[in-house]
């Protein structure tokens, strides 16, 4: 469990807290479930465990993500083994579910080149979940190995916008303007129904000016340029991939922390 907590991996701990009659396992039996399935432990196998894994994975679905400060939630389930699970034994079991890390900091990176590689090397040491999308398998294979990183091979990167979580920070580091542009336009077409907390596009001020023209040509208001960062990253004035990565990581942290700060309430001056 400690490894999952440290890696910020969403998971559910499942514990048998009560049992009556003939049941597959004793009170206190526990397992850990991730979105990929059983991670560790058992509550007895068979239909009880299969049902519990399915219920645990439902808690990890994106639409069930919570915004609570403690980043966890819990639930109980009671099943009659014959009636609810179709088992021949007539016992019953009560199971406690507790989800953890259900609202991770998500970062989606389009492009797996040198800057993306350097950026991921920094981000993998932070509490986040990273997805990197690229049409080139050989470049994806060069990325760091990390349980926090999902590598997605796709020849149609703009279509992958539909798969991104609403709360994901999106970074465009593809091969150039020709590949960044359709992804950016697809991201902005979701506005205002789907506004990502951060969109960044690598490039110069000249590229930023071209992107504004692209918006207008796509029948979008020029004001949509306020919805993304280009140039992306903190202004440190370097073109080295490692330093570009540091500047981008710094801006991502800066924007993340803006969202985490509680709103400031201004109090009226007291009247003496």
Image (cartoon, rainbow, N blue to C red):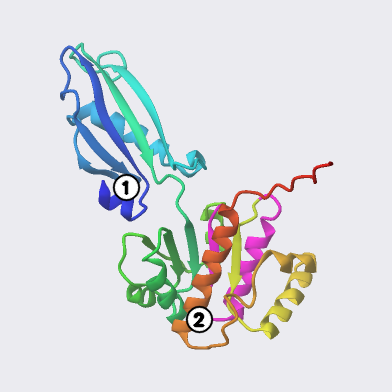
Quadrant housing residue 121: bottom left
Q: Residue at x 53, y 66 (%)?
A: 252
Give x and y (percent) for residue 81.
25, 17
Give x and y (percent) for residue 213.
76, 76
N-terminal of the pair, mark 2 or mark 1, is 1
Q: Label 1, on which residue?
A: 36
Q: Badge 1, how many Cα within 10 Å: few under 14, some, many 20+?
A: few
Name the side, left or right, on which 20 lies relative to 113. left
Please state the extent of the stretch shown in magenta in the rendering: 167-193
Q: Label 2, on which residue?
A: 244
Residue 236 vs residue 188, the one in the foreground: 236
Secondary structure, mark 2, is: helix
Inter-mark Cα distance, 2 to 1: 34 Å
Give the quadrant of the C terminus: top right
Give x and y (percent) for residue 105.
47, 55
Q: Is residue 175 above or below residue 58?
A: below
Q: Residue at x 40, y 58 (%)?
A: 127
């Amino acid at each position: 469990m400690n490894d999952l907590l440290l890696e910020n991996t969403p998971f559910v701990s499942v514990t048998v807290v009560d049992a009556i009659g003939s049941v597959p396992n004793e009170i206190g039996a526990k397992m850990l479930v991730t979105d990929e399935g059983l991670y560790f432990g058992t509550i007895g196998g068979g239909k009880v465990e299969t049902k519990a894994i399915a219920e645990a994975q439902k808690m990890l679905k994106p639409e069930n993500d919570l915004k609570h400060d403690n980043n966890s939630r819990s639930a109980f389930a009671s099943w009659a083994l014959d009636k609810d699970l179709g088992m021949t034994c007539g016992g019953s079991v009560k199971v406690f579910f507790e989800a953890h890390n259900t609202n991770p900091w998500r970062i989606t990176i389009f492009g797996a080149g040198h800057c993306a590689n350097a950026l991921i090397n920094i981000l993998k040491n932070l509490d986040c979940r990273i997805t990197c999308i690229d049409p080139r398998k050989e470049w994806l294979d060069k990325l760091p190995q990390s349980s926090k990183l999902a590598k997605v091979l796709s020849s149609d990167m703009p279509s992958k916008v539909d798969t991104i979580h609403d709360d994901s920070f999106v970074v465009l580091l593809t091969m150039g303007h020709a590949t960044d542009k359709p992804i950016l336009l697809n991201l902005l077409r979701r506005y205002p129904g789907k506004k990502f907390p951060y969109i960044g596009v690598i490039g110069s001020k000249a590229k930023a000016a071209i992107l504004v023209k692209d918006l207008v040509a796509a029948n979008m208001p020029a004001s949509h340029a306020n919805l993304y960062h280009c140039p992306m990253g903190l202004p440190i004035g370097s073109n080295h991939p490692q330093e570009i990565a540091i500047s981008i990581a710094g801006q991502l942290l800066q924007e993340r922390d803006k969202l985490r700060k509680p709103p400031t309430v201004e109090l009226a001056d007291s009247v003496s």
